[in-house]
Amino acid sequence: MRSSPIAFGVAAVAATACVLSATAADARDRPFSTAKLTVRPVIDPGFAGSTTGGTGQFSVVQIERYRCAVATGAQYGSPGGAMDISCNDAQPYRQDFNPDNELAIVANPKVPTHLLAGSNDYFYRINNSTGARQALVPTGFFTSFNAGASWVDGQVPMKSGNGAGDPSPAFNGKLSGSTPQTGWAMMAQLENVGGLNGPFVSQGNVSVSWSADGGITWSGPTIAMKGQGASIGPANNAVFFDKEWLTVDNSPSSPHYGRAYLAAVRYLNDLHGAYAESPVYLATSDDGGRTWSTPKKISGSNPLCTAQTTGPAGQCDEDSFPIPEVAANGDVVVHFANSNIDSAWETAGELEQTLLAVKSTDGGATFSNPVVIAHLEDGAADTPWSVIGRQTITGHQIRWQSPGTITADPTNPNHWVVVYNDNFAGTHDAAPASCLDAIPGTAPDYNPCHAVTNTNIYMAESWNGGTTWNPRIALDTSAGNQWFPWADFHTNGSLAVAYDSNENIADPGGGRNDTFNHVLLTIAPRTPSSGAAAVTGREVLGPNGTGRSAGEQVDISVTHWAGQYVPQAAWPAICGPDGYTDPPVTNAEGKDCNVFDGDYTGLAVGNDNHVNVVWTGLNRRAVSPQIDAYTGAPHDGYAQDAMFARR
């Protein structure tokens, strides 16, 4: 048995202790945590705030029924530039400042101009007289029948609970007709119940809805994986499914054509809500998501998995971010991050992750034991931390994740690629292991282990169907940080990769990068002897709507701003922006830095070889009804919009 050596410093965020109470005393990204911000932070207990304002009252049902439309034009931009596909309507539910993040996208295999995207779609209730802020977070959908020129923006129904998200869209080609209006769309999501005035979250289900009209009207969800108890809380043996991902076998020549594969991690509580395990589970559906097989554990065992919290030696059961992918011949490979392999930890107890893969050649009936893809430099001693106790990258406060995604080469079913971001080239493991006891550190930099990130985009390849993987290959090593990559193949075997990057951004302070770009990279087709990657194209995807910033303003947030979680003396000034003021505050560096804009971005290459890219943009200034305790005025900053580009 292994007990965690890391204890989060709660004193630094005493104003919002309920935020950190959802985190385990280790470096894992426990489910839900602060990602959806369903807690109600109190900025200053002595501040009564305004008795006016707020976003009004609305129910979950009202939100689920709400629809709006977006089209190419001056306000939103165009697919040829970078288009905001999220409605920014002030009425009826104040969508003009509410976030969309964790964007994912797919293209219909029969009609590649038919697109479906998903997001965490926030709706806030704000009470400025009490300082309370409640977020309802359904899964948003975006459907386009015309290659992204116009979109319908709405919400997928929830089976139960008051929170959803972690969208994973898919099309079932076998059940789809020949028009967008007859496409069979699917959307997987999490579902949970959050308390109105506390940090505990229960239920933890994974559900799937389907649409027979291309993604306009949606069925009630089917529960594919069922949680139980207050697993983000003190409950014993509670279960919470998280980090789900859905994919469909859309190859007509596959023996399992039309089968849907749904993977997730199952978080299990030990006594008093302590972490026990989080193995990967998988379920399948052969009827478009209407029914699902009983989920089964597939993460398996490997002699390298020696570090255990509760499980037996060899079990690779402390996992996150499983992504299933299907090759043209029907083989399935699931890649995931694992923290059982302590032989890869340079600093004792830092819980570095290793990317692993398991494979099925019989439609998911059985899986191989896991093999190593790559060891990561993403442990607790490898990065700075944020004010909410999450790992971040130097110069920012955003929650950072490393696992990336997996994709299969349509020209060769034995060629698989995993694209990920990692701090391999940065400064890591630079302090004694005792630094872990000081996590998350203190202002201004929240960096007790003296890490300096230089996160780059890397690729791992397998040329034997996922049995073994070659050493990492660098795709982008630009100065600064790159993060949240997603990748897909063109039909000729070239690879498209999109990600956030803050290279080539003016930085007068010399130590931080206050904006970022979303970048699209193209890699030439490869062979087993190719060696270094050949980059054939690199483009910054800039918004072309009116009144928008050219770069993404990650350090001036309208909703997820750091100053609402800690008092002024604890602001993370390391993130700037350089010389930032917010009158009457003359030195506001660190006050408005974004602590969360999702864990991933999205990309899908259609059968027409067009690349469809989505990401969380922060290029539109907005005003929230939340009163800023430091300025006495409604808080303003950059909204998290659902951005789309097509190339």
Image (cartoon, rainbow, N blue to C red):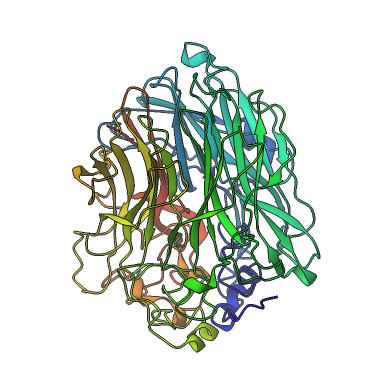
Image x and y of residue 110, in percent: 44, 17
Residue sitting nearer the eye, 66 or 629: 66
The correct choice, above or below, for 365 with respect to 368 in the image is above
The correct choice, above or below, for 160 with respect to 557 in the image is above
Q: Quadrant of residue 339?
A: bottom right
Q: Residue at x 46, y 48 (%)?
A: 97
Residue 52 visible in rendering: no
Residue sitting nearer the eye, 214 or 404: 404
Q: Is residue 303 left or right of residue 116?
A: right
Image x and y of residue 303, in percent: 59, 64
Q: Is residue 26 left or right of residue 193?
A: left
Residue sitting nearer the eye, 258 or 498: 258
Q: Residue at x 75, y 39 (%)?
A: 294
Q: Quadrant of residue 407?
A: top left
Q: Residue at x 51, y 76 (%)?
A: 350
Image x and y of residue 195, in percent: 73, 58
The correct choice, above or below, for 412 with respect to 23 in the image is above
Residue 76 visible in rendering: yes
